[in-house]
Image (cartoon, rainbow, N blue to C red):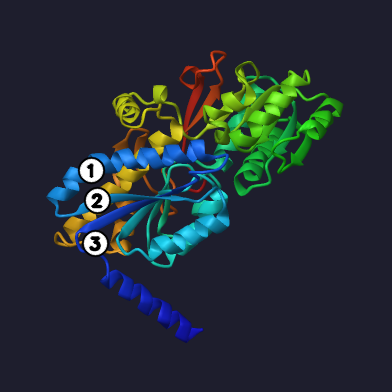
Amino acid sequence: MRKIGLLVAGVAALGVALGQANVIKIATQSPLSGPQAALGEQIKLGAELAVEEAKARFRALGFDLQLVPYDDQANPDVGVANANRIINDPDILGVVGHLNSGVAIPSSEVYARVGLVMVSPANTAPRVTDRGLPNVNRICGRDDVQGPVGAEYAVNNLKVRNVFIIHDKTTYGQGLAEEFRKRLEALGGRAVAFVGTEEQANFVPIINQIRGARPTPELIYFGGIYSQIGPFVKQLRERGVRTRLMGGDGLDASEFVRLAGKENAAGTFYTTVAGPVSAFPKAREVAQKFKQRFGKEIEGFGIYAYDSANVILMALENAIKASGGRKPTRELVSQEVRKVRMEGLTGSIEFDDKGDNKKARYFVMQVAATGNWADNKLIRIIELAPPGSR
């Protein structure tokens, strides 16, 4: 085992030596194909816009700045395979990603082997940062805060007590649903069911469970992604079940309306760690640039990916200066990321010793009847520190 480890280290060192002295790359990892591509593309495009804006600055420093996107397909195995390709490209000095916590966790352990920094715009599972990896950071909030935010709104504002809880069996979806349930029960509410499903098409059996549940659910909570929740809501409403619905930030995509149908989606509540453009006055100009450049509207995770890329870019510039104008090491860039203090589009960004943003925002939203995602109602913004932050 020791010989193999030395061989790997030697190959890694050779890879650094073969890097291009004047090229610096930032990678993205997110689903660019498959049912979650709408959210994954926002991450790629948000980072791409930030990199394009920074190219001239880096050219003045003597470097050709490039973005290299990777499609992780929302699949942990694909994410890890991509991560191994990424660490073998010595010109990649930072990663913006991922969308799915279940992909980010194993992939980030690959990055950690070579000290490659990751800044996440979207990964909310507590374990992402609770492992204490020095190269892992996120600017968004956490499920162990987001879940309770949803439960508190449901109990205190919607005045519900009995909730039918569904999750998609993923690290993200199940974790979020569990955190919602814990806070719901602490507030005196009741989970009349806690059901996990990987079903993507036929939700009739679960709908029948909802109809038969006692006491009658006053709210359905679904911890999952829009690609699954959309068809579920469509079938739910087609079968006459009008029970109110709430989800987390996996629902935060305009594709939800297309999949569920405008009338069926209207009124759905969701919490998100990535607020809409309307929540960020500084984002309006960037939103216009995004629309002009890519021909589509920027959504929550696009804004957060833009900020995540700019965190890495600031750290890179500081690392170049600390290296006397030379190309910095991955380890130095990672160290500089932890030192970043900046005002992004999304607010203040500063990391604690685990890599969590010291103050993250959480948003309670409601889907508009118009079907236009930009018209969704912003109900509440809550800014909270992560648990145990110092």
Q: Earlier in the sequence, mark 3 or mark 2?
A: 2
Residue 238 visible in the shown view: yes
Q: Amino acid at mark 3?
A: Pro
Residue labelled with disc 3 = 328
* Label 3 vs label 2, nearer the camera: 2
Q: Earlier in the sequence, mark 2 or mark 1?
A: 1
Mark 3 secondary-structure assignment: loop
Residue labelled with disc 1 = 54
Q: Residue at x 48, y 17 (%)?
A: 375
The image shows residue 295 at horizontal and vertical percentages of 37, 28
Residue 372 sits above or below residue 90 on the image: above
Count numbered badges in the picture: 3
Give the image quarter of residue 267. Answer: top right
Quick one: label 2, few (<14), some, or many (20+) residues within 10 Å? many
The image shows residue 323 at horizontal and vertical percentages of 18, 62
Quick one: label 1, few (<14), some, or many (20+) residues within 10 Å? some
* Label 1 vs label 3, nearer the camera: 1
Residue labelled with disc 2 = 65
Residues under numbered marks 2 and 1 in contact, where contact means CB atoms less than 8 Å apart:
yes
The image shows residue 253 at horizontal and vertical percentages of 52, 30
